[in-house]
Image (tube, helix red, strand yellow):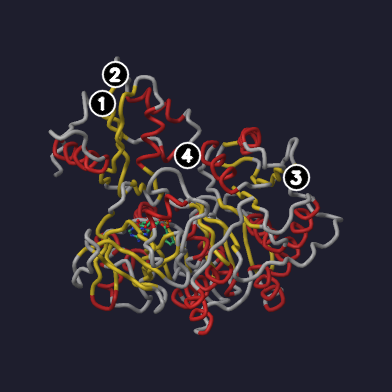
Amino acid sequence: MIPLRQEWPAQAAERYRARGLWQGQTFAELLAEQAERFADRLAVVAGDQRWTYAELAARAEQAASGFVALGLAPGDRVLVQLPNMAEFLSVVFGLFRAGLVPVFSLPAHRLTEVTHFARKSEAAALVVCERHEGFDYRDLARAVQAEVPTLHHVVVVGEPDEFIGFGSFGKGQPAAPPAPSKPTDVALVQISGGSTGLSKLIPRTHDDYLYSIRASNAICGLTEDSVYLAALPVAHNFPMSSPGIFGAICAGATIVMAPAPSPDVAFPLIEREGVTITGLVPPLALLWLRAAAKAKHDLSSLQVLQVGGAKFMPEAARRVRPELGCTLQQVFGMAEGLVNYTRLDDPEEIIVETQGRPISEDDEILILDDAGNPVPEGEAGNLLTRGPYTIRGYHDDAAANARAFTEDGFYRTGDVVKRVAGGYLVVQGRASDHINRAGEKISAEEIEDHLLAHPQVFDAAVVSIPDQFLGERSCAFIVPDGDPPKAPEIKAWMRGRDIAAFKVPDQIVIVESFATTAVGKISRKELRAKLRAQLLESEGKP
Ligand code: OOB
């Protein structure tokens, strides 16, 4: 088994410790502490379940016993694919308590992705729920298990069929021995948005992740009186840690799990539970703005609406305060680390026009031109960063690491930004070829590879197209091999590739050939840019 590591140079680590950023605590220790301090306070609300901190800790303890009884050993990886439900917390904190490492898959992921994560992480177990939004995760688990020989155990929240049920999991088993986890160990694994090819694994340590979460709490005003609505899928870094559900646990606040982020589900929860803060991606924020105008529910408890994951346009951002009656906080972050926030007391112009500034004074920011030289303030350039909670490398992927990190440890974010007064960043676009569809990142290369497997596809190029609602949508240009396939056929075929539904191209354009330059083939990047420009021009939107 390839060990999970995330290491900073000794000098940097020393500095982060000396400055009190890394506090030397593990997630298991955190929950134990909170269960003492906030024993009878409400930790999580989900449907008709309401667990106090003491109850959550007891459930995590029992889950830990269950995982140990399976024979899992500290450091083993466990793939977790759960929607927003109370058990997400008892499973994940149970894993922490047992010294196991959760690897997070989104509920939208399907066989192709989940198999890749399980293989790449050498996962020993998979935790899923019975079904969610009409999809049966036990079928998925069966198929993944058939593909991945290390995957010995499947635990199911709900009716388990032939698998292990989470209901009585760990009951009557001996207490898990104290986990040997150290704060510098990898606590969990996040999944990259996949700017090139398949998603990469992002190992985050207890020290670095907890620092980013605690610092986020201070910036976002999260206290024990806060009520955080988890509207986006909590496996994603934004609702998990910015400050999200883990921030809520750090603050002794209450988490309200929304089974879906739509206004009809979220608004009644805001009213009923007195939600004070939540986070959304821009298209959802637009839906909420539209729905708020005729909402029958009292949303007055909501103090902060965070919007991030993709660019929130100033015109829409400007509407948040007057129409929802709360403060907008823009969040520009990445699972690899760096998170920028507008501050709650920033002038409205900053809140509306920028994507915030870094969490930490120790976040180092470089904005460079393509030749690697710093650009003057106010000009757009490539964003690179290094700091106390930005990873220094992906798990087991030398080629990706060579591309994504400089020799001195800066992460090349792939984002094009400009820095304005006060160190605030304004996202201008992206250097890398992925599609940011409503906050979901899609690698052009990954989708092209699927398309190329189709017998009637000779060549394919996938590009992002600006979309009024989604921000960006995906468009696949296809050069047919013989008879041109029909767009609906391609879409149906892509759906059959067992990939997340958001990756199926929104638009298909059949072309005779891809232009090549006189000297030969142009790069994929240039080709994609050219095709995008041609399409926009033909639609009258240069
Ligand atoms: C968040 O994380 P990821 O890993 O899904 O995606 C990161 C990428 C960024 O590199 C950037 O391209 C884009 O998503 N992005 C934004 C943005 N927030 C993220 N682009 C424009 N404006 C924004 N506000 O998406 C993520 C992680 C933690 C907190 C928030 C978002």
Q: Amino acid at mark 1?
A: Ile
Q: Which residue is mark 2?
A: 484
3 or 1: mark nearer the eye: 1
- Of the pair 52 and 510, the residue shown nearer to us: 510
Q: Is residue 265 visible?
A: no
Q: Which residue is mark 4?
A: 500
In the image, what residue occupies the spot 69% across and 62% down?
99
Horizontal relation, residue 50 to residue 220: left or right: right
4 or 2: mark nearer the eye: 2
The percent coordinates of residue 278 (x first, y second) are 47, 63
Judged from the image, the secondary structure of the residue bearing numbered disc 1 is: strand
Precedes in sequence: disc 2 or disc 3: 3
Mark seen at residue 62: none
Q: Which residue is mark 3?
A: 165
Horizontal relation, residue 65 to residue 537: left or right: right
Q: Cα distance, mark 4 to mark 1?
A: 23 Å
